[in-house]
Amino acid sequence: MKSQSKIGFLGPEGTFTEIAAKTLFEKEDRIPFPTIKTCLEAVEEGRIDYGVVPLENTIEGSVNMTLDLLSQQVSLPIVGELVLPIRQHLLVLPELENLSDIKTVQSHPHAIAQCHHFLQHELPEVELKNVASTSAAAEFVRDSGDTREAAIGNDLAAEKYGLKIARSNIHDTEDNDTRFLVVHKTPEPLPRTSLFREDRVTYKIILPSDYPGALHQVLSAFAWRNLNLTKIESRPMKTGLGNYFFIIDVERPNKEILLKGVMEEIKALGIGISVLGEYPCFVVNGK
């Protein structure tokens, strides 16, 4: 990775996606993009070097936009993954002294939903407002200058917008993590760091419409080689009802011959298979 690479991420600034980008590229230039598509297109066009986008959340599930763009619309290999714990805080203006003075709490709908228990028990009378992002909520509180306004957001948003964390870790569950993918124009994986956990391969599988039991054959090719599948997900081909392809994540073994054998066996069955990325997975332990 060259020095001072340009790192794009799904914006705005102060979101968990920026935290992910900062974790992996602390000393690089980071540029927010308004959508996942514009971020990935910027990588494809060479305007930035790497793109960081969300893939999956423990509570909300997969980000289908990311899956569909990487598998059907852009040609960018996955070169890294980061699993980041999602930690939500109550953000207020520094001069606020009593939580009872808060009249409105705003944030992204997912963040509000993730903090339901705290809001119901600690701030049952406040008005809840949905906005585009946790960062936008924090920015609004700063610009309002009104101590009665509060936001739900992360540490980075508090830092960027000069807010105080009135209550930390107000989310309902500790098991709330988000997977972020890193893409690049070439398949060279990110270098391993102290956050490294495992290597992984992601495949795209297209099954023939006239092949009963094809998915079973695919899974068997991995199973008898003792390869561990960490995820399998279907997505519509968008060519007609009932037409789907599959995204399969597999722990990458030390023996390359096993992966080569999988590819050869599945292709021999007349099933489409391609590699979306071979990459290291990094994990931030937030507990």
Image (cartoon, helix red, strand yellow):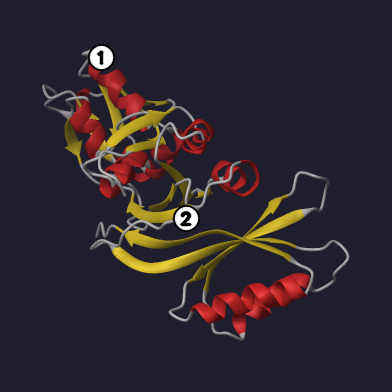
Where residue 184 sits: x, y (%)?
45, 46
Q: Name the image quarter holding residue 218.
A: bottom right
Q: Is residue 116 above or below residue 128?
A: below
Q: Going 44% across and 43% down the picture, which residue do you hit? A: 53
Q: Is residue 40 above or below residue 216?
A: above
Where residue 83 sits: x, y (%)?
37, 56
- Judged from the image, the secondary structure of the residue bearing numbered disc 2 is loop
State the separation of the CA atoms marked 1 and 2.
Answer: 43 Å
Where residue 13 sits: x, y (%)?
32, 30
Specify the amino acid type for callout 2: Pro
Q: How many C-alpha atoms fall within 10 Å of the one at disc 2: few (<14), some, or many (≥20)?
A: some
Residue 22, labelled with which disc?
none
Q: Is residue 271 above or below residue 264?
A: above
Q: Going 45% across and 45% down the picture, which residue do you hit? A: 54
Q: Name the image quarter holding residue 213.
A: bottom right
Q: Going 27% across and 43% down the picture, which residue do you hit? A: 22
Residue on which the image places disc 1 = 143
Q: Nearer the viewer, mark 1 or mark 2?
A: 2
In this view, the residue farthest toward the right is: 210
Where residue 55 sits: x, y (%)?
48, 49
94 vs 141, left or right, is left
Specify the amino acid type for callout 1: Asp
Q: Is residue 175 above or below residue 124?
A: below
Residue on which the image places disc 2 = 187
Q: How many C-alpha atoms fall within 10 Å of the one at disc 1: few (<14), some, or many (≥20)?
A: few
Mark found first going from the N terminus, 1 or 2: 1
- Judged from the image, the secondary structure of the residue bearing numbered disc 1 is helix
Q: Using the rendered image of the protein, determine whether residue 58 is visible from the camera's viewpoint.
A: no
Front residue of 119/130: it is 130
